[in-house]
Every structure is written in C-alpha cells, then in structure tokens.
Image (tube, rainbow, N blue to C red):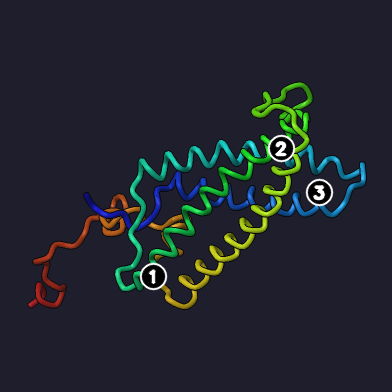
Amino acid sequence: MTTPKAFHPLARLLHWTMAVLVLAMLFIGVGMVSTVSAKHQWLLAIHKPLGIAILLLVLLRIVVRLRFRPPALPADMPALMQFVAHASHWLLYALMLAMPLIGWAMLSAGGYPVMLGSSWHLPAILPASPVLFAWLREAHEYLAYLFFLTILGHMGAALYHALIRRDEVYASMTVGFPASAEEAQEPPAGIEPPASDALPPSANAS
C-alpha cells in the first residue's frame, strides 16, 4: 500500500472546520465564566449546540482517520518527538470527545436541558444530582484548561514544522497538497509527459 503524502481531503476539511469551532467554543466558554449577567445568556445558547456539533464531527473525524491512512511522520524525526506527536493527537481526540460529553452530563445532573433549538432538546444522560453537577462542572473547567494548553502545543508544533524544520508535516494538512506520491507525480490533465528518448530541437535540426 502506498503511503499518502497528505491527509485525505475530507480529513483536512474536518480538521480546519473543527479548529474554528473549537477555538470559538473555548472563547465562548471564557466569556461565560467571566460574566454572570443575564444579557450574556446568548453565549450559553450558542455553547450547547456548538458542543454537540463538535461531538458529532469528532466521531466522523475518527471514522475518517481509521478509514484513510494518514501520512507518516518524517523518518528523521527523533523517536521521542514522534511519540509526543502521536500522543498529543490522541489526547486532542480524547478531549474533543470528553468535553461535550462531560458538559452534557453536567447539564443533565443539574436538571438543565441541552437545547438545540427553540423546541428541540437532548435527553438527560445522568439523573439530577447536585453533587454530580458540582463535580462535573469542576472537571469540565479543568479539562478546558488542559484542552487549551494542548491546542497551544499543537499550534506550536505546526509552526515548528512549517518555519523551522520546513518539512511536509504542515503542508500535508493544508488545502491543495497532493494526497499521494502518484498524485504528486501525475501531470496536469491534457498535458502529455515528454518522451524519455526525445531529442532536443538542435539534434533534430542536424
């Protein structure tokens, strides 16, 4: 099986879409905890459906990751750096799953419905319990800090590959990068590759 040189286009689309949503979610969360004013309740109204959207997208992203083989890391990367890269990726997946699930469970324990619209809400996944609500709220907060630090590390690693190592790791997740070695070597449509035994014009003229 040929090792792809870039992530599948669907994986790239999901990556950048979720990057925007996750960053928006974190900033909305900061806005929610920094104010208790009733006029900022619209932040909570966005936070809930956004979390469920991220949960659904990360499930789809895991399926895509398992279905389409990701590109290999550069062979000259130290083994420890490769281990940290793989571990941080799976930590991001775990946090993208855990954060919305814990938020959903927290609201269920507090007796608050997870509204996805004016009349549509998700069922509770935990019984109402003030103790559970307090514990899950604290877990949600601390995991949000870990999530933020992990994202900062991920962004730093991307800049390291793009600006210092200058390898194909960052480019493999950007739009327009060929997905495989065959695709990279394939000439544009309508253009025939030159014959290997073709002679230059000067040779034909002589």
State the residue at coordinates (53%, 53%). 92
Q: Is residue 12 left or right of residue 195?
A: right
In this rendering, the answer to whether 88 lies above or below 44 is below
Q: Quadrant of the C terminus?
A: bottom left
Q: What residue type is labelled 1?
A: Leu
Q: In which quarter of the image is residue 197?
A: bottom left
Residue 190 in the image, given as x and y percentages of width and height: 29, 50
| Residue type marked 2 | Leu
Please state which of the two labelled residues, at mark 3 or mark 1, is closer to the viewer. Answer: 1
The residue carrying mark 3 is: 32
Q: Report, in whole angstroms, how far the alpha carbon at label 2 lies from the one at label 3.
A: 21 Å
Q: Say which label, 2 or 3, has the lower sequence index.
A: 3
The residue indicated by pointer 2 is 132
Q: Which of marks 1 and 2 is in front?
A: 2
Which structural element holds mark 3?
helix
Q: Nearer the viewer, residue 121 or 195?
A: 121
Residue with the mark numbered 1: 80
Residue at coordinates 48% horizontally, 71% vertically from top-left?
162
Crowd rating for badge 1 (residues with CA inside 10 Å; few <14, some 14–19, many 20+): few
**Considering only order in the chain, which callout, 2 or 1, is on the residue closer to the N terminus?**
1
